[in-house]
Image (cartoon, grey):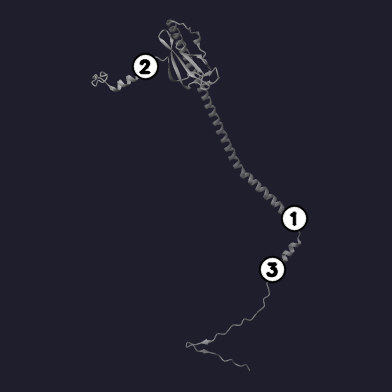
Amino acid sequence: MSERKVINKYYPPDYDPQKAEKQVRQLSKKLKTMRQDSVTIRLMTPFSIRCLKCSEYIPKFRKFNGKKEVLPEKYLETIKIYRLSIKCPRCNSMISFKTDPNRGDYTMEVGGVRNYTKENNNSQIKPDESTEETLERLLKEEEEQNLTEEQKGKDRLEHLEERLAKLQQEQADDEAIEALQKNNLLRMKRAAALDMLSEPSKVDEEQDNLDDLTAQAFRQYEDQEPKEPEKSLESSTKETKSPQTLIPTKIQVKKKHTSNSLGVVVKKRKTKKH
């Protein structure tokens, strides 16, 4: 027991306690998972899956707490193949799929079915394919991909040219429509101006017609009017012109008393008439 209670310990000059702590933690994690066949990880479904037990739909990119296992088989004796397993969120049945490095995709194993599979030439790939065959296949795929990209680029250019031609045609049509609208407006304005100029002549003609009608009406009235009323009118005018008879009237005026500068009023005596 005295050996374990040694106080003096050797620390090298380049010793870093933080790095040592990290290394210890990593080693402890490895020791925990070394003996285990599967490791719990957080993963997302790479494709949409349908459960075979309860027909539950699991969409793409849904997160799960799954398990990862390393299979004993390898691709080209170097690349590892992993098995990923999740539980159905409805019935808790196990759904597992594994990696396929030969096709660069996943293959379903147990518990589910892919809802959609891509239609490509991966079905022609042999399961036991050598390295030379894989290289040839990859070169062919690359050439085909380049050709398809070139064709797509040409198609895009043609599509852009057609679109530009359509836009130019639409602009020309819009300009033609605007020109027609302007011409119509000018014509309307000219017609309105001519109407305004012709309106006074029409008014004058109507006024002349009214004057003629009134003159004719006065003439008819004068022709139909009797002569006796004219005499009565003449007599009335004569009576009005004759002078009126005036009756003379006396006006009495008060006599003023004569007065001198001293203010003495001198009254005249009335003389008796004999």
Q: Nearer the viewer, mark 3 or mark 2?
A: 2
Q: Residue at x 67, y 49 (%)?
A: 210
Q: Residue at x 70, y 50 (%)?
A: 213
Q: Position of residue 205 (x, y in %)?
A: 65, 46
Q: Which residue is mark 2?
A: 31
Left or right? Give the position of 190 relative to 245: left
Q: Is residue 162 above or below residue 180?
A: above
Q: Which residue is mark 1?
A: 223
Q: Which residue is mark 3?
A: 240
* Whole-number angstrom distance, CA of label 2 to CA of label 1: 143 Å
**As rendered, which of 128 and 202 lies closer to the eye?**
128
Q: Nearer the viewer, mark 2 or mark 1?
A: 2
Q: Is tag 2's residue or tag 1's residue first in the polypeptide sequence?
A: 2
Q: Position of residue 189 (x, y in %)?
A: 57, 38
Q: Position of residue 169 (x, y in %)?
A: 53, 24
Q: Residue at x 28, y 22 (%)?
A: 17
For this orientation, the residue located farthest to the front is 1
Q: Is tag 3's residue or tag 1's residue first in the polypeptide sequence?
A: 1
